[in-house]
C-alpha cells in the first residue's frame, strides 16, 4: 500500500521505516534536506516538496502527517488542500487536541477528503517494538488504511483499534498521556523515598530491577526506570526540570468539564509545573508567613 509521510522527525522517520520494512510503498517529505537524506540512505524514497510528494502517489492517496500539534497541522493541511482530490485521506498521527481534529475532519469532509486522527504511542521504541494506535474517524477511511495500522502496531491483531468517530483517537491518546503522567509521578515519588533512606535500602537500582519480575507494579515504564537507575544511580547531570506536551493539561481540563475527579493526574501535572520554578515565590512567601505568625526561622540564600 502507498503512503506519503509528512514530517521526518524521529517518530515520523521511524514510522516511515517500519512501514517500508513491512512492504508498503513509502514516500517521505520534510522541509529539511538532511532529514530526507537520512531516510533515503535507508532505501526509503523522499520528495522535496508537498506537490512532488502528492504527484508521486496514486489516487486515491493516503498521506500521514507527523508535525507538531496546533498551527503546523493547519498550515500543512492548507498547503495540501489545493493538491488533493476527492477520495484522498489525511492522517494526523501527532498529539493534536481532539476538538481541533473534529474541526479539521468537518472541513475536509466538505471537499470529499477523509481524515483520521490517530493517537500514537510508542516513542523512540516504536520502530522495533511497534506502536499503539488509537484511530478516530469514519469507518471507510479506517478500514481502507487498516493495513498500515496493522504494520505499525506490535502485531496485525494487537496494539491498534478504530476507537470511534472523528476526535476519538486523539481523545483516547489524551487520556492515555494523562494516565502516564500519574504513573510516572508515582514511580518518581516512591524511588525518591527509597533514595532518601539509602542507609536502610542500599541499592535503589537493585529494587527497581527486583520489581520488574513478579511484582504488581511491574510495567514498561518500570523497565525504563530500572535501566535509567542502573546506568546512572544518582541521576547525575540531569536537571530537575520536567516539560509537558500539553496533553496532561487537556486531560485535567476535560476532567473538570465533565465533573470527574482526577486528583492523581492533576497533581502530577502540578508537580511538573513546580519542577520548572527556579525561584519559587510561593515557597518564599510561605516561609515569610511562618516567620510572621510563629517567629519561625527563615532560611536565607
Image (cartoon, rainbow, N blue to C red):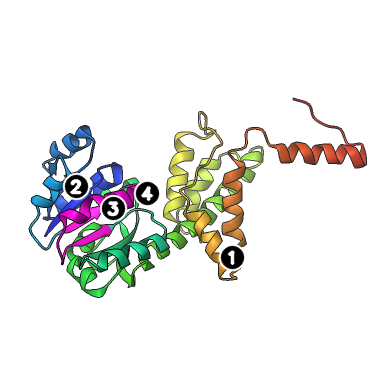
Whether residue 191 appears in this view of the structure is no
Residue 39 sits above or below residue 212 on the image: above
Looking at the image, is mark 2 or mark 4 nearer the viewer?
4
Give the spatial CA distance, label 1 vs label 4.
Answer: 26 Å
Residue named by callout 3: 129
Label 2 element class: helix
Q: Are marks 2 and 4 in contact (CB under 8 Å)?
A: no
- Counting residues from the N terminus, which is met first, the one under dot 2 or under dot 3? 2
Label 1 element class: helix
Residue 227 picture location, percent across and down: 43, 42
Label 3 element class: helix
Residue named by callout 1: 256
The image quadrant that residue 263 belongs to is bottom right
**Region in magenta:** 62-91
Looking at the image, is mark 1 or mark 4 nearer the viewer?
4
Label 4 element class: helix
**Which residue is at a point 46% across and 44% down the rendered structure image?**
226
* Mark seen at residue 190: none
Residue 33 picture location, percent across and down: 19, 33
Looking at the image, is mark 1 or mark 2 nearer the viewer?
1
Q: Is residue 26 left or right of residue 248?
A: left
Residue named by callout 2: 17
Whether residue 82 appears in this view of the structure is yes
- Counting residues from the N terminus, which is met first, the one under dot 2 or under dot 4? 2
Residue 203 picture location, percent across and down: 56, 39
Give the spatial CA distance, label 3 vs label 1.
Answer: 35 Å
- Counting residues from the N terminus, which is met first, the one under dot 1 or under dot 4? 4
- Counting residues from the N terminus, which is met first, the one under dot 3 or under dot 1? 3
Q: Are marks 3 and 1 in contact (CB under 8 Å)?
A: no
* Mark seen at residue 71: 4
**How would you rate the neighbour count of disc 3 (Cα within 10 Å): few for under 14, some for 14-19, many for 20 or more?**
some
Residue farthest along the top direction in this orientation:
301
Amino acid at each position: 500500500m502507498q503512503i506519503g509521510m509528512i514530517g521526518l522527525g524521529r517518530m515520523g522517520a521511524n514510522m516511515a521505516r517500519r512501514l517500508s520494512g513491512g512492504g508498503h510503498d513509502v514516500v517521505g517529505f520534510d522541509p529539511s534536506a538532511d532529514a530526507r537524506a537520512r531516510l533515503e540512505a535507508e532505501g526509503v524514497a523522499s520528495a522535496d516538496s508537498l506537490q512532488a510528494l502528492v504527484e508521486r502517489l496514486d489516487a486515491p492517496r493516503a498521506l500521514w502527517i507527523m508535525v507538531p500539534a496546533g498551527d503546523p497541522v493547519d498550515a500543512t493541511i492548507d498547503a495540501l488542500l489545493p493538491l488533493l482530490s476527492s477520495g484522498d485521506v489525511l492522517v494526523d498521527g501527532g498529539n493534536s487536541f481532539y476538538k481541533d481534529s473534529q474541526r479539521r475532519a468537518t472541513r475536509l469532509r466538505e471537499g470529499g477528503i477523509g481524515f483520521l486522527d490517530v493517537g500514537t504511542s510508542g516513542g523512540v521504541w516504536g520502530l522495533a517494538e511497534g506502536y499503539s494506535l488509537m484511530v478516530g474517524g469514519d469507518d471507510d477511511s479506517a478500514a481502507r488504511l487498516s493495513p498500515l495500522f496493522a504494520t505499525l502496531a506490535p502485531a496485525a491483531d494487537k496494539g491498534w483499534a478504530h476507537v470511534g468517530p472523528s476526535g476519538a483517537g486523539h481523545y483516547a491518546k489524551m487520556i492515555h498521556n494523562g494516565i502516564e503522567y500519574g504513573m510516572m509521578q508515582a514511580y518518581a515519588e516512591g524511588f525518591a523515598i527509597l533514595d532518601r533512606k539509602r542507609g536502610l535500602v542500599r541499592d535503589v537500582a537493585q529494587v527497581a530491577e527486583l520489581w520488574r519480575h513478579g511484582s504488581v507494579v511491574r510495567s514498561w515504564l518500570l523497565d525504563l526506570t530500572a535501566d535509567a537507575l542502573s546506568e546512572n544511580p544518582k541521576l547525575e547531570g540531569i536537571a530537575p526540570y520536567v516539560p509537558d506536551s500539553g496533553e496532561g493539561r487537556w486531560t485535567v481540563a476535560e476532567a473538570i468539564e465533565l465533573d470527574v475527579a482526577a486528583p492523581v493526574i492533576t497533581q502530577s501535572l502540578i508537580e511538573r509545573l513546580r519542577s520548572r520554578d527556579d525561584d519559587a515565590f510561593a515557597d518564599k512567601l510561605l516561609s515569610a508567613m511562618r516567620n510572621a505568625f510563629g517567629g519561625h526561622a527563615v532560611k536565607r540564600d
